[in-house]
Image: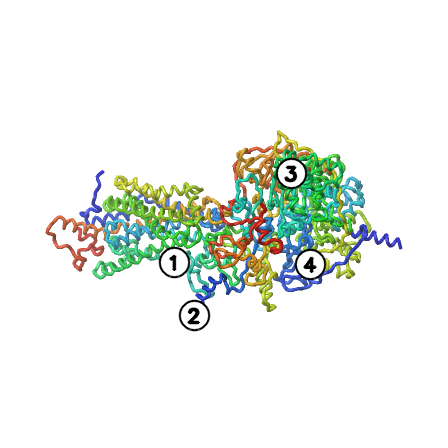
Amino acid sequence: MSLSNLLNDWTRYRQGIEEGGFHDYEHIFGMAIDLNKCIGCNACSIACYAENNLAVVGEEKFAKDQGMHWLRIERYWDEPDLGADDQEFQEHGASFLPMMCQQCNAATCEPVCPVAATYHTPDGLNAQVYNRCIGSRYCSNNCPYRLRYFNFYSYYETSWPAPLDQQLNPDLSVRDKGVMEKCTFCIQRIRVAKDTAQREERELVDGEFTTACAQTCPTSAIQFGDLQDPNSKVSQLWKQYQVKLGTTEQSKQNKELRGYRVFESLNTEPCVMYLDRVREV
Amino acid sequence: MHINEKDIDENIKWAEINKDVLKSMENPRPAYWVAIGLCLAMLSVAVVAEIYQYQTGMGVTNLNNPHMWDLYIATFIFWIGMSHSGTLLSAILHIIHADWRKPIYRFAEAMTTFSLMTAGLFPMIHLGRVWNMYWVIPYVTDRGIWPNFRSPLVWDAFAITTYLTSSALFLFIGMIPDLAICRDNAKGWRKKLYTVLSMGWRGDDRQWRNFRKTYMLMACFLIPLAVSVHSIVSSDFAMSIMPGWHVTSFPPYFVAGALYSGCAAIITLFILLRYFFYFEKYMTIAIMEKICKLTFAIAMVWTYLNLIEFASIWYGHDMVSKELLISKFTGPYSFWFWLMLFCGSVVPFMLAFKKYRCHMPTMFVVSLVLNLGMWLERWMIVTPTLSLSYHPFQWDVMWPSVVQWGIVFGSFGWFGLLFLTFVKIFPSVSMYEVKEMVYHRKREAGSAASEEGSAAPVKNEEGNKATPSGSGTPGLEGA
Amino acid sequence: MSGHEIKRRDFLKVMGWGGVGATLAGCDMPTTVTLEEGKEEVVSYMSPEEFVIPGIGIYYASTCQQCSAGCGIYGRVREGRVLKLEGNPASQINGGKLCQMGQAGVQTHYNPDRITKPMLRKGKELVEVSWDEAMAELDKRVGKSSSVDGQRVAWFSGSMSGHQSVLLDAYLESVGSKSHFVYEAINSAVSRAVNAEMLGDATPHYRFDKAALLLSFGADLLGASSSPVHYSTQYGEFRSAPRGMHVQIEPSMSLTGANADLWQPVIPGTEGVLAYGLINMLVNKMGYDASGLSLEVRGLIGKYDPAYAAKVTGISEERIEKIAGLLKSKSPSLVLAGTSTEGQRDGYNATAAVTLLNVILGNVGKTIESSGTFPFPQMAAKAGSSRDLLSFASALGKKQYDVVFFHGTNPVHTAPNYLGLVDNLADVPFKVTLSMFLDETAAVSDLVLPLLSSLEDWGTHVADVGGSTQTTDVTIQQPLMKQLYDDTRGFGDIVLSLLKARGVEEYTGFDDYYAYLRDAFSSTPEAITGGLGTKAFWQGSLQKGAVSIQLDKGALQSNPFASEVSEHKADPSYPMHLAPSARLGMWDGRHANIPWLQEAPDQISKVVWESWAEIHPSTAAKMGVTNGDMIKVESRQGAIKVKVYVHRGVHPNVVAVPMGRGHEQYGRYAKGRGVNPLKILSQVTENKTGELALYGTRVKVSNASDKGTLIHMGDSESQVGRKLVSTVTAEVFKNTEGGGNSVA
């Protein structure tokens, strides 16, 4: 470590703090999820099962909360913002929240892994290296979103009785027991798109790749793309709703504007922006 | 109840000390074999459970999302905590010249080493892929992969291995003069063993001088190490962002808790050894009283730190932590939480009463209750935070499976086995130091008796001559 | 010349293009499909060698068969295996999107419980036999030389369309059977009937993307509807700025209801009164013009004053007025009736009342558009209804059939107990089931013919709902991979061989169903092919996954008619209403064998792998039960025991037990899991249409004194004050995003 390296790192760090971002990342893949449009139908979750070789754990293990749903649709009955929670009926319906790994830029899971099996890629992705994982599960304990799922068993032994195993996506592995896993923003798809772009000697183009969940979402509530690309749909949305990275509290010109990140006050820097649910009261 | 106020009878003959201690290492009685059998049985429960868990996966422990950790980590902290007693008694009290420690520090040190050996198993047992556990150790690979030095778990690995090595070394070094005594009195394989272990101890001046220096150096080294080890273990929690874990006072809290449980364990073993090895002469009630007072003081420190934690959360702005605290008081874990506070903060008040302090059966039970409280404390640190953290959708309350209980249970068998083996192979009371103690007491008594005062021995070569030696002809001076 | 004409017309009929003449437009054929890697021209999996590039996924277009919506799909194929299904972006129905059932199509295809060989009943057991033996048996029973009376042959199927339908019709004609029952447990037959009569179009296009207010009387558009993805896509637009408001009135919360701005519980069977109450208020208080209506209708409206409606429905007059006010202030609106309204003794009249609201509000033509006329009725969708199940059951009771074919539906599972289907079926001498799985119906059959999966088979489909008002798609289902099991056969192939066995000349020339389809496409009227050559047209169609057909323009009428709804009567001995709600996921039970869907939490209760009953907290309190406790739901036809899920999205007088589970057969994932509420349905039918009144069953519930826990996802139903789902009011939304800034 030379002095100049140290100074450079410091400059980068200061810049990151002051300008609210992670500027030297090649990409920062992010999402915008419109809860006004999310109908809670679960299509994204099953698309994720199909794309990412998620194990079906079965009744008993699911009952023990050992399921593997990388993308879960949470359903809440109360609406703290609308008040009046003691009504007789659920008059404004339900509150649905699709929750997948928030790909935090300051991910709390990363520093605690003893073997650096989870780390940040230059793509701004919070990656999980299955081969490196030793299963200390510290990362999951330190994830405020509880979006990391552990292979408590060798699920592959029971999940895909032949010929169901023929459906498995060869672009990514099937995980064995003792390994932590979580949503990767369909990194295998990003990989293919990046390789193609590289082969064709061009930049990655918004829209040539997307995650399985965003692709299948019937109401297009989920948008996925590169936040470093100012022209991508996602970065436009973040801009439109004045949601920024690099802050623990969004300061918006228009205070009423929708758009927030879950638990952003924890300074985890999630890359998923949620647009508030809307209800006519 | 008449109580002998002296912590040791200054008239004990040195030869008697040798005889008593060496006798304790011989001819195990049936009760010993029963104890060994019991420990083996307990251990085999854990071994079976671990094999099952290894083969099947961590799921058999009932761990889940959100409970990624549970009893293994809690018990790990428990055993680490237990290990602090030896350091406290041998190193800290050594430095501050509290010589009442002398008859009891040896087994406490052994306890340190063995509880560390027990504790060290848990981080391995709890790994999902235990076969890759060596990856947390920094070693040079062709791929240049290193562990993540930012992770408290890596610090743990360093801290525990260092502490284990140091405390084992400390135990061994402190035992050398005694091993020489053993050597001189042993036959057969024991003779060979002690010959090797006593490293040619003859008890000459140079050896004693080097020995004293080394011992003092190790003691000085061990004290900050012990404090840092449990601080580092507390970092596993304090360095996270979870409510109930992210607590600034955790390092001292953990250290206090560690000393607390260590002292309680010393009381337990003290009573057992005193009873089974007829060590009443050495492990006197006066010493017991001192440990009890020490334990009581630490219990109050621990209670105080608990209150600090509650207060800082209560008056803080972290709503999530506050909710968690309230749910600890009233929620699904409240029974265990209140039981912990009862065991940890209320029961120690019995130590404040001489009547109880001097009653061995009572103290035996009390010490076990205190350690139960301390075990519960660790459980209440680890689990409620995981159950009721930031994200309510993933709230859950989980009861550990029989596999977890089995391994926790078996760890006591493992510890017991190590300890039982130790007491029959090594002297569990430091012979040379007890001799020292007797000598000093006698000198003190003598100087008190004669007003004009004979020349008090000074620490010089002459003094060394007067110092009991384990070498040569054991018990010669006393004979 | 005329002879030639006739021949040509016959030929077209054989090929499915027969119809009422054709105003056919061309359609642009894409020359390439986008592959994951670069762009290459890919045609079909029929010549695989050229396209199997190791490590590279190739997409083929096909049609989803998980429900009858007929969404266009892309199958990702790698090394000869289909790995994942995506929506076909070119599809008019789903526009590149898929629901969870569609996504799970691969698990139907790769299901480990598929039957791989024909099975013939020998003695009591079904034993595996060769196709030769199976076909010989069929020949013996219904072949040319058999003595079967065509009148005594019936075909019982699920919804079907396209060339399979054409072939099947040809087969039934050749046998001389007129009995083709088309049954779907989840259907909209009553609405169709009402729409046909009142609007002159059974399946008009609902355009809630154009509506400012969607008022749904239990129509679960986003969940168990005739085209869930199509409606969900529209719903996304409906919710974009300017955001439409959504009011849902239903007995128990559906997925659609969970998204409503205002969710209003209602006693099942009183929706019609509520609709009339609203009309009354609109006409009498809000100045809507009713002069165009007939005297009879006006008289009827007068009868349902709001006070009366409030009394019957238990919904306050203020609430009725609020909804009426919304209908007035937010125009155009769209008012729809769903299963809970239709599935009553007078469901037809209630649905008509709901539809009448559209007429009064002037929505017809604005948010309800004509679906046009599909020019090839042979291929048009045969939509299922439960009336066909009832008439089939009664025909069975009269022992009208010697041979029954089952395909694409599982009546033994979904039919209520009171129909006695199993007993009556036992009297049918020969029952054939064409199925991929040994389901309950197959298990009682005498011959089970294993089908190819929809990802292995050829076919064409015409969706019932969806598409634009100008064109509709004949979607193509093509094999995405080589068949998994050699001894399974395509539906078209089987029907074709049945036809051949009957010796029908026109079909003897086709080797297989593929050859038939190729010929059918060769004979496509030029107006459709747009002058493309046979091969180019075929390849283009395969790439696109569909052939676009210009629709004959239709127009909606308004024929409001009086439909008096009878007063809702309480039943003191069975005071509760059973809501056997259908869910996106298990559907009518056909997806219970898909592990992904079994493990996908129900959208409302978040329960997995098992059945549950939803009740209101006040009901639960009365019974002394909490989440997970067992209750007994008892109707006059039987009882089921099921764990309870308590939430405020149910009317206190209603117990909702979602259908889909409770299989006695159907493979490892479905068998013996949960309960089937359809079994205890009472003998109530809709008066006018003869449909099964799905929501007409009265039950009593009791505490079964068995504590338990539901297997579910998520342990808190409250956000506990955390900002997880933040909600803003529509006003804020309007201020910030208004009409202009469209979102995502």
Mark 1 secondary-structure assignment: helix
**Chain name for mark 4:** C
Return the residue nearer the eye: B192 or C70. Answer: C70
For label 4, the residue is C45
Tell if the residue under mark 3 belongs to the same chain as the one under mark 1: no
For label 1, the residue is B158
- Circles 1 and 2: CB atoms closer than 8 Å: no
Picture coordinates of residue B366 (x, y %)? 32, 41
Tell if the residue under mark 4 belongs to the same chain as the one under mark 2: no
Residue C686 in which image quadrant: top right
Residue C642 in the image: above or below residue A221? above
What residue is shown at x 17% (from left), y 53% (from top)?
B477
As measured in the structure, the alpha-carbon distance from the residue carrying label 3 to the one carrying label 1 is 64 Å
As measured in the structure, the alpha-carbon distance from the residue carrying label 3 to the one carrying label 4 is 41 Å
As measured in the structure, the alpha-carbon distance from the residue carrying label 4 to the one carrying label 2 is 59 Å
Tell if the residue under mark 3 belongs to the same chain as the one under mark 4: yes
Residue extending farthest top: C572
Q: Which mark is residue C678?
A: 3
- Circles 3 and 4: CB atoms closer than 8 Å: no
**Chain name for mark 3:** C
Picture coordinates of residue A219 (x, y %)? 62, 52
The three-letter amino acid code for the residue at tag 1 is Phe
Mark 3 secondary-structure assignment: helix
For label 2, the residue is A4
